[in-house]
């Protein structure tokens, strides 16, 4: 049975851990509020952008722009994996990495070459240890970023696609649904495809100077907008996952403190009982000797 001193040290250690996890929970909660506000404000813009571009691209000859044209043979698939730079957010990063590798394994089994682009330290480190080729790894940018990051990543991917180094590009990111639910999502960003339903009422627009001219301007920006949305979603998902993980850790610390306190009281009671038995035994021995 552990001594009173050992149990007391363990309780103090868990108390300190509880203070840390509680502080991290509060920090993640504050960051989540800002990240959630950003993604909720950006989603309507991204959705409307997608709607207008779908109307533009529908019925247009895909050969007018390389970002619209589907290659006859898909030889190389690019995967943009967006994760966090830091851990302590439960299974959030591991789920994203697993989702990306599942897609990569599937494409590889079809005879395709795989090239990774990573944003976030966790994803970059995982790809480095794998068999797959990593074209670019960006780290220490997820804590604070703006559209510049999406523009940087988007330009690299668009350039590689137009040169023929990539034939298809998928983005794996954490889709923020609510504080308790964040799921990995696979979004094909190149070639740009329309997912409009057949029965959906199509809006009518008047375009100047022409649909083709507008597409040449909007298609590259559309890709960057989708990447920025993935970055915002992943950022909000990361903070939500960390807040939940730290909340669970704090509760586990409280349960452990309760258990250790019971053990401490039992050990102290056992020590007191042993001392009383020694006193009673000594008194009885003195009485017997007299």
Image (tube, rainbow, N blue to C red):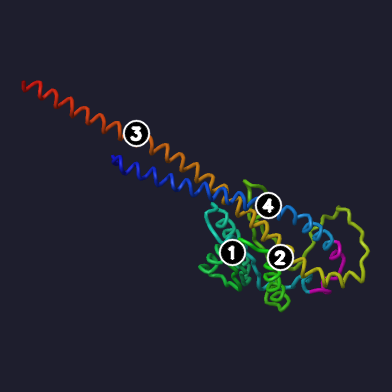
Q: In the picture provided, is 22 more to the left or to the right than 190?
A: left
Give, as a single range, the part of the protein colored magenta.
55-65
Q: CA distance from mark 1 to mark 2?
A: 16 Å
What mark, if any, has residue 36 been given in the picture? 4
Label 3 residue SS: helix
Choose the circle earlier in sequence order: 3 or 1.
1
Q: CA distance from mark 3 to mark 2?
A: 57 Å
Choose the circle earlier in sequence order: 1 or 4.
4
Q: For this rendering, which residue is in front, 160 or 41? A: 41
Residue placed under numbered mark 1 in the picture: 120
> Is residue 72 found inside the magenta-colored segment of the image?
no
Label 1 residue SS: loop
Label 4 residue SS: helix
Looking at the rendered image, the disc whose residue lies closer to the viewer, 3 or 1, is: 3
Q: CA distance from mark 4 to mark 3?
A: 45 Å
Choose the circle earlier in sequence order: 4 or 2.
4
Residue placed under numbered mark 3 in the picture: 265
Q: CA distance from mark 3 to mark 1?
A: 47 Å
Q: Quadrant of residue 66?
A: bottom right
Residue placed under numbered mark 2 in the picture: 147
């Amino acid at each position: 049975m552990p001594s009173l001193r050992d149990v007391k040290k363990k309780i103090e250690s868990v108390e300190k851990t509880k203070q840390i996890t509680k502080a991290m929970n509060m920090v993640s909660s504050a960051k989540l509020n800002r990240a959630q506000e950003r993604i909720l404000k950006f989603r309507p813009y991204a959705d409307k952008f997608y709607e207008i571009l779908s109307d533009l691209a529908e019925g247009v000859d895909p050969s007018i722009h390389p970002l619209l044209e589907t290659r006859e043979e898909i030889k190389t698939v690019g995967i943009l994996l967006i994760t966090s730079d830091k851990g302590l957010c439960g299974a959030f990063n591991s789920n994203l990495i697993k989702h990306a590798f599942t897609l990569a394994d599937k494409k590889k089994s079809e005879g395709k070459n795989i090239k990774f682009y990573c944003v976030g330290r966790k994803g970059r480190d995982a790809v480095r240890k794998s068999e797959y080729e990593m074209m670019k790894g960006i780290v220490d940018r997820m804590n604070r970023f703006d559209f510049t990051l999406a523009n940087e990543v988007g330009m690299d991917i668009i350039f590689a696609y137009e040169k023929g180094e990539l034939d298809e590009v998928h983005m794996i990111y954490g889709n923020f649904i609510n504080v308790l639910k964040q799921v990995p999502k696979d979004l094909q960003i190149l070639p740009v495809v329309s997912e409009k339903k057949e029965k959906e009422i199509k809006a009518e627009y008047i375009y100047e100077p022409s649909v083709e001219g507008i597409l040449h301007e909007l298609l590259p920006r559309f890709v960057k907008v989708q990447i920025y949305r993935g970055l915002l979603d992943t950022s909000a998902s990361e903070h939500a996952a960390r807040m939940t993980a730290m909340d669970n850790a704090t509760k586990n610390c409280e349960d452990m403190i309760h258990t250790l306190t019971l053990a401490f009281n039992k050990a102290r009671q056992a020590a007191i009982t042993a001392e009383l038995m020694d006193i009673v035994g000594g008194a009885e021995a003195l009485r017997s000797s007299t």
